[in-house]
Image: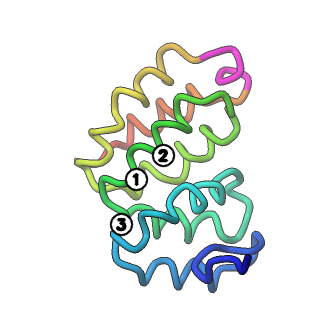
Amino acid sequence: MEPHPCLPTDKHDVEAVRRAAALSPVALEPLLPDLLEWLQDANWPVASPVADCLAGAGPALLPPLRRILRGDDGAWKYWLLELLPPRLPAPLFEALRPEIERLASAPTPEDRREEVHLAARGALAAAPG
């Protein structure tokens, strides 16, 4: 099966992210879980452009984001919290606030090892609005 032209094929595929950013939120919605995977490491060249793209995805972004924030991949949570909250519109950030507060105040041992609680505290301190 041919990869979707709006999904990066490697960590340098910024052109695919540009195509994704040009999509409407409705067209972008089915790509959200795959795009979120590119936020697993902020050192990847696609990470920042993907975060910019996702910030405009609207409320459809909330369910896949919550799945990650409730999951057990501490490194992924850390990078999500570093990259995405500063870019989110205030209403989306506020919808995620309970998850972020939980990570800030009651991190799992894995989250503590990956410093998720510190990233969550930083996101809360820099909250929009």
Which of the 4 image quarters holds residue 48?
bottom right
* 63 part of magenta stretch: no
Q: Image point 29% across, 56% down: which residue? A: 89
**Mark number for residue 127?**
none
Residue on which the image places disc 1: 61
Q: Marks 1 and 3, Cα distance to the nearest angstrom? A: 9 Å
Spatial separation of the CA atoms under disc 2 and disc 3 = 15 Å
Q: List the single residue furthest toward the front.
A: 1
Q: Which mark is residue 64?
A: 2
Q: Residues within 10 Å of mark 2 (few under 14, many from 20)?
A: some
| Element under disc 3 | loop
Kindly state the secondary structure of the residue where label 2 is placed: helix
Lateral position of residue 78 relative to residue 84, left or right: right
Q: Relative to 12, is 84 above or below? A: above
Residue 22 in the image, given as x and y percentages of width and height = 42, 84
Q: Position of residue 108 (x, y in %)?
A: 62, 16
Residue at the spot x=56%, y=25% of the render?
117
Q: Amino acid at mark 1?
A: Leu
Front tag of 2 and 3: 2
The amino acid at mark 3 is Gly
**Which numbered tag is attached to residue 56?**
3
Image quarter hosting the N terminus: bottom right
User: What is the span of residues highlighted in magenta in the rendered image?
Assistant: 108-113
Name the main secondary structure of what is drawn in magenta.
helix
Circles 2, 1 touching at the beta carbon (< 8 Å): yes
Which residue occupies the foreground of this view, 21 or 5?
5
Identified at 68% across, 74% down, the residue is 8
